[in-house]
Amino acid sequence: SQTIHQWPATLVQPVGSPLSLECTVEGTSNPNLYWYRQAAGRGLQLLFYSIGIGQISSEVPQNLSASRPQDRQFILSSKKLLLSDSGFYLCAWNRDTYNSPLHFGNGTRLTVT
Amino acid sequence: KNQVEQSPQSLIILEGKNCTLQCNYTVSPFSNLRWYKQDTGRGPVSLTIMTFSENTKSNGRYTATLDADTKQSSLHITASQLSDSASYICVVSAWESGGGADGLTFGKGTHLIIQP
């Protein structure tokens, strides 16, 4: 069976510090990978998605970036965090087939102070 | 602009009662509609996926309906349990995305609380 791991679960970082969130998927190959952000009272916002190693599409221009160094590894980064980067970050994967559901990790609660 | 509106924003019901959550969308051209359950502090989990040709789909005590003509969907929960307390998110996919996640529009969710 497939599993998705996301860490850390919670993170408190000062403004201006760097960020690295990691996500890995097990039990499948060549998944589509996604980073979402969920702000309180708002819907999920797609930040980045990747259909393969080194292939990253950005949906929202911001100070965040994503990388996919390996087939089942997806990393969300920032060089300098802003207060507005606080939120709940979710990694997800699905198969490259029609109607394939998204499978989410358990998220990272990021608080920028 | 593609939009998904869910109602109510929040709902409190007693354990054992039934409830219905609503989802209206303006996504076009429509591909499919999904309902997810999100427990507090966890990632969403898929409950159902429906294409335009499907009117209803069940998953245990959860039954989703879809009216593609009026662009409305509902999620009915039967005999609610304490574990049903969660946010329920409606997600609609646009056709040109091939159903891919980059073409999804998320609702803000309905926060459901089941009281003993």
Image (spheres, grey):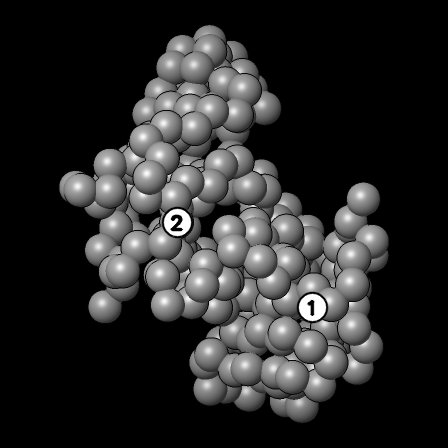
Secondary structure at badge 1 equals: strand
Is residue A22 in view?
Answer: no
Q: Amino acid at mark 1?
A: Val
Residue at x-position 63% and y-position 58% = A94
Give the chain letter at badge 1: A
Label at residue A64: none
Callout 2 and callout 1 share a chain? no
Please say if A53 is above or below B27: below
Residue placed under numbered mark 2 in the picture: B32
Crowdedness near tag 1: few (<14), some (14–19) or many (≥20) residues, C-alpha within 10 Å: few
Q: In the drawing, what numbered circle is on residue A12?
A: 1
Residue at position x 32%, y 44% from top? B52
Q: Residues within 10 Å of mark 2 (few under 14, many from 20)?
A: many
Q: Is residue A105 left or right of residue B17?
A: right
Secondary element under disc 2, as helix, strand or loop, is strand
Please report the residue visible at 38 percent of the width from the left and 24 percent of the height from the top: B76
Q: Quarter of the image holding residue B106?
A: bottom left
Answer left or right for A28 relative to A63.
right
Does residue B13 appear to the left or right of A8 in the view shown?
Answer: left
